[in-house]
């Protein structure tokens, strides 16, 4: 589905990013595995991707640092020739009730989750514009998939930094989509619900926590990273060439306000 395409996945050494990087490789893309900590884990992801017969390498960079992002994309253009797909995935939580939320926590989450996506998108777009459409590769000059969250629309008490960052991702995505569609660049988002990854371990690691979590999920199961990976692969492919500026919620129905099934 993505033969010959070059993809960058940020935060690809674990969780959703890892599954997505492996999924893109299975679909035929060469993949850069970005990470900030745990090189060994990133190298394992590279090995797994290479089993699909495509190229991959790991690149350490903090997506919130402009020079590191510029360097990462420049290296990718040297190594792979270009970039066709950016999956802006790197993200984190630093949770606290508002009165205890330090400016550091606020800034860290906004810097990584929102500014990090912006910097990666900006640098990828420069290369998309330089290269233009290559019809044998894809109908688009480039594809950006922002990994957002159900919390781009569901308010989340105790997580004001995180929810604000994802609300920002939604508007950044839509604005970039509007600005870049005339250049044949597709910008979209995939918004996961509760996915079994290290970021929300406490929400699923005990039976009772998982039972509580499932009350928020009409479909009745916690998501797997592969659920998101397949959505991203299809979103990046020409099968969805006419999809521009949308968010695909991959959440087992979490955004259907399940509390209203009986209430209201
Ligand atoms: C958060 C998880 C949370 C999920 C559903 C995600 O964006 O990172 O911690 O479980 O949303 O609330």
Image (cartoon, rainbow, N blue to C red):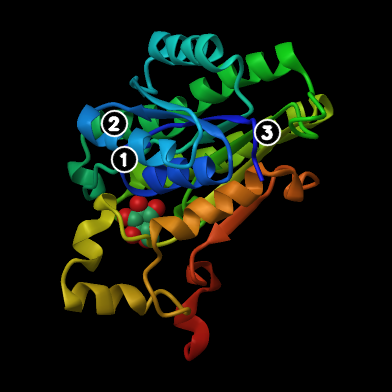
Q: Residue at x 23, y 27 (%)?
A: 39
Compare residues 92 and 43 and report the one nearer the observer. 43
Residue 148: x %, y % from top left:
49, 46
Give yes or no for contact between labels 1 and 2 (Cβ–Cβ under 8 Å).
Answer: no
Q: Earlier in the sequence, mark 3 or mark 1?
A: 1
Please tell me whether mark 1 sits on a helix, a strand or a loop. loop
Res. 156 visible in picture: no
Quadrant housing residue 214: bottom left
* Mark 1 vs mark 2, CA separation in Å: 21 Å
Q: Which mark, residue 13?
A: none
Q: Earlier in the sequence, mark 1 or mark 2?
A: 2
Q: Determine which residue is flagged by label 3.
A: 175
Q: Is residue 174 left or right of residue 178?
A: left
Res. 231 visible in picture: yes
Q: Is residue 25 left or right of residue 198?
A: right
Q: Which mark, residue 43?
A: 2
User: Of discs 1 and 2, which sits in the foreground?
Assistant: 2
Please tell me whether mark 3 sits on a helix, a strand or a loop. helix
Q: Dot 3: few (<14), some (14–19), or many (≥20) neighbours within 10 Å?
A: few
User: Of discs 3 and 2, which sits in the foreground?
Assistant: 2
Looking at the picture, does residue 113 appear above or below residue 246? above
Q: Residue at x 34, y 19 (%)?
A: 61
Q: Determine which residue is flagged by label 1.
A: 92
Q: Residue at x 57, y 35 (%)?
A: 29
Compare residues 51 and 133 and report the one nearer the observer. 51
Residue 193: x %, y % from top left:
44, 61
Quadrant housing residue 63: top left
Give yes or no for contact between labels 3 and 1 (Cβ–Cβ under 8 Å).
Answer: no
Q: Is residue 5 left or right of residue 23?
A: right
* Mark 3 vs mark 2, CA separation in Å: 35 Å
Looking at the picture, does residue 42 appear above or below residue 73? below
Q: Earlier in the sequence, mark 3 or mark 2?
A: 2
């Amino acid at each position: 589905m993505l033969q010959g395409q070059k993809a960058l996945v940020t935060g690809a050494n674990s969780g959703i990013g890892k599954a997505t990087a492996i999924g893109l490789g299975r679909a035929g893309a060469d993949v850069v595995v970005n990470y900030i900590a745990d090189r060994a884990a990133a190298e394992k992801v590279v090995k797994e991707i290479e089993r699909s017969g495509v190229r991959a390498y790991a690149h350490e960079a903090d997506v919130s640092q402009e020079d590191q992002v510029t360097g990462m994309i420049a290296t990718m253009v040297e190594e792979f020739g270009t970039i066709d797909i950016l999956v802006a995935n790197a993200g984190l939580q630093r949770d606290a009730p508002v009165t205890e939320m330090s400016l550091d926590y606020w800034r860290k989450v906004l810097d990584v989750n929102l500014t990090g996506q912006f910097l990666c998108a900006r640098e990828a777009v420069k290369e998309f514009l330089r290269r233009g459409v290559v019809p044998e590769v894809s109908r688009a000059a480039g594809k950006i998939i922002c990994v957002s969250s159900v919390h781009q629309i569901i308010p989340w008490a105790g997580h004001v930094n995180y929810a604000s960052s994802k609300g920002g991702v939604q508007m950044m995505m839509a604005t970039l989509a509007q600005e870049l569609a005339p250049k044949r660049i597709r910008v979209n988002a995939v918004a996961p619900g509760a996915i079994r990854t290290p970021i929300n371990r406490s929400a699923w690691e005990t039976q009772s926590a998982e039972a509580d979590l499932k009350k928020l999920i009409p479909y009745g199961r916690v998501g797997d990273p592969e659920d998101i990976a397949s959505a991203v692969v299809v979103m990046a492919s020409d099968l969805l060439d006419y999809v521009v500026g949308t968010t695909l919620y991959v959440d087992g129905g979490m955004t259907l306000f399940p509390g209203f099934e009986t209430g209201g």
